[in-house]
Amino acid sequence: MFVVSLESVQCARCKGHFHMSCVSPPLIAKPARGYGWTCAPCSRWHEDQVDSVDSVQTPQTHQSGSS
């Protein structure tokens, strides 16, 4: 059973708690007040969401061989 302690950090997205020494890379200090920390699965999910929005919003340029 996981026990929330001074040595744990909470993900700003999923609200899960993680031991600071168990995450990769390990955290040596909690984020400063006002800053959030995001676990690896939530970070990957967010990056995938941003990448999919960028690919939809970024127009594909077509370069032809003629000038």
Image: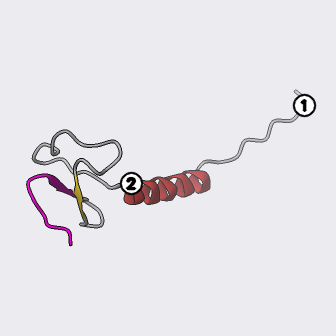
- Label 1 crowd bin: few (<14), some (14–19), many (20+), radius 10 Å: few
Tell me the residue that label 1 is attached to: 65
Residue extending furthest toward the top: 67
Instruction: Using the image as rendered, state which of residue 55 and residue 26 is in the foreground.
Output: 26
Q: Viewed as shown, does residue 34 lie left or right of 24?
A: left
Q: Quadrant of residue 8?
A: bottom left
- Label 2 crowd bin: few (<14), some (14–19), many (20+), radius 10 Å: few
How far apart marks 1 and 2 lie (CA) works out to 44 Å
Q: Is residue 58 above or below residue 10?
A: above
Label 1 is placed on what type of residue? Gly
Q: SS at mark 1?
A: loop
Q: Residue at x 15, y 45 (%)?
A: 30
Magenta stretch in the rendered image: 1-10
Q: Viewed as shown, does residue 65 lie left or right of 16?
A: right
| Magenta region includes residue 24 | no
Tell me the residue that label 2 is attached to: 40
Provide residue 6's location: percent of width, then percent of height: 8, 54
| Magenta region includes residue 8 | yes
